[in-house]
Amino acid sequence: MDPVFERLKKVGYNRSYFFEDGVEKKYEGFAGFSRGFMESKIYQEVAQAVTTLFYDRGVKSILVCGCSSGEEVIWMFDRGFDAWGIDIADIVLDAGHPRLKQGTITDMRMFSSNRFDLVTAFDVLEHIPSDYVDKAVEEISRVNKRFVYTIIPCPHRNTEPPFMRSSEDGIFEHYVFQPIDYWLGKFEQYGYSEIDMGFPCFVRPFNLPRDKHTHLMLEKQGSLTIRG
């Protein structure tokens, strides 16, 4: 069994984490992980924005890390993308969709190497215990062959460490709070470099202030980039 899976399940990443009223206190205003998620069709906006952003670069296969209940993955799949999702929470299995898998990004053995044109991880990497960050980046790199797009909370001038939250039982939800250079260094070890595709303040909840979240778009060196 993946040790990270066992460790993070103690935080309580399950149906109640995302959908019960008590959880709203943790993600107040962050509708992407609340009941408002499905009603507002935010997942559709996110999926459309991501696919549009990378479409002219020839992206066909996409892995969504931390896909929650997987609506954006299903949206992409229904429109012809080779889309898959993975999440530690058991709600990922609720849809009964074969493209949605339960697990962690530190152990994605269900996916072959160089499988995906694009791997996304929105507000995911900070939840990985610091001693497993290298393994998470290694696994992302292994299954990815071209682009990585992450959104990560990083310290900026106006952001203080209290952004590191802990659950009611004292188990940290956010383990890592490091400058963007920390993350760049991790990915550069696997041949990635940052690319400038413009800051995509495209939809809620990913139009968060830049002093709290950093959008990091990366391209693996030596990969074939097709522009339409």
Image (cartoon, grey):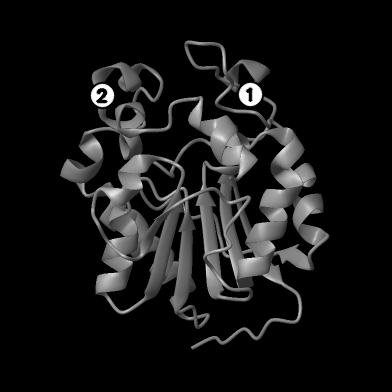
How many labels were placed on the picture?
2
Residue 8 x, y percent position in the rendering: 54, 32
Q: Quadrant of residue 161?
A: top right
The residue drawn where x is 54% and y is 73% is 116
**Kind of residue at badge 1:** Thr
Asked whether the viewer can see residue 19, the reply is yes
Most distant residue in the top direction: 169
The residue drawn where x is 27% and y is 61% is 97
Instruction: Answer left or right for 74 relative to 102.
Output: left
Q: Which disc, if any, is residue 159?
A: 1
Residue 124 x, y percent position in the rendering: 54, 43
Q: Nearer the viewer, residue 63 or 11?
A: 11
Q: Which disc, if any, is residue 1?
A: none
Residue 162 x, y percent position in the rendering: 61, 15
- Secondary structure beneath dot 1 equals loop
Q: Nearer the viewer, residue 127 or 107?
A: 107
Q: In whole angstroms, how far apart are the C-alphas of marks 1 and 2?
A: 28 Å
As drawn, 196 above or below 165: below
Q: Which disc, if any, is residue 20?
A: 2
Q: Quadrant of residue 198?
A: bottom right
